[in-house]
Amino acid sequence: MVKAKLLAADDAIPLLTLDRRRDNKITIRQLLGHLYNSFADYYLYRLSHTPSHHLRNFVYKHICKMNIGEDVVIYHGAEVREPANISLARGVIIGDNAILDARNGIYIGEDVVFASNVRIWTEQHDHEDPWFRCSTQKHDAVIIDKHAWIGSHTVILHSVHIGEGAVVAAGAVVTKDVEPFTIVAGIPARKIAFRNSDLRYQNNGKSRSFL
């Protein structure tokens, strides 16, 4: 199971593969769908580099229908897939250049902090499937409870639940649930220590201007 999940962590694989008819021609409906999805991805890419936190959050919340609480900070360069399937509770901080693949949902609790370059993947291709499809396995949302701290260059794969106050060390690949107030590290991530459970801090929404 771990091996299969690790094989899936390849962001070079395209999100959309056009199915062809038996005569090897793409239908107009498929072409239009492909163009629409490509434009949506481009729009979100441009939005992520807009030098205004307030504008980015406004568009994410009111146009893209992302569920964003108060004092949420999403830094520049975030790659967001299916933003309507993302819920960010009060005080969440998403570091720069994150990838949030929410095709099966991402739910993040209060005062969770992401460092730079965190990747969350909730979908994957089936490497055993003759057609290399995503739809052959059941994948669930990623859930991260309050006060968790996700280190730089972490990869979190589908169906993972990270407990309250947990810490994921930089560079870890998380393939299974993480218990509350534990510290995990490595590939795949394993428990290495415990964290203080008396966590009282609240993020206030302050951020670096323009970024």
Image: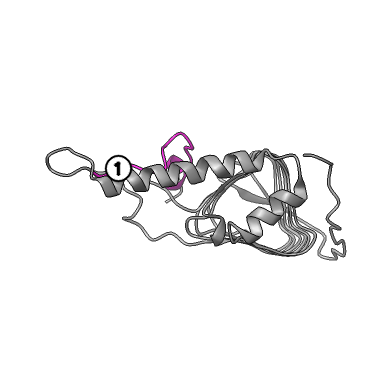
What secondary structure is the stretch in magenta mostly built from?
loop
Comparing 183 with 14, the one in front is 14
| Residue 155 in the figure: left or right of residue 51 | left
- The reply to whether residue 142 is visible in this rendering is no
Quarter of the rendering containing residue 24: top left
Q: Residues within 10 Å of mark 1 (few under 14, many from 20)?
A: few
- From the image, which quarter does the C terminus lie in? top right
* Residue at position x 43%, y 46% in the image: 37
* Residue at position x 52%, y 61% in the image: 141
Magenta segment, which residues? 3-19
Q: Amino acid at mark 1?
A: Leu
* Residue at position x 46%, y 33% in the image: 12
Q: Position of residue 196 (x, y in %)?
A: 82, 60
Q: Position of residue 79 (x, y in %)?
A: 59, 43
Quarter of the rendering containing residue 63: bottom right
* Residue at position x 84%, y 58% in the image: 203
Residue holding disc 1: 18
Task: Based on the picture, tell me whether residue 17 belongs to the magenta stretch.
Answer: yes
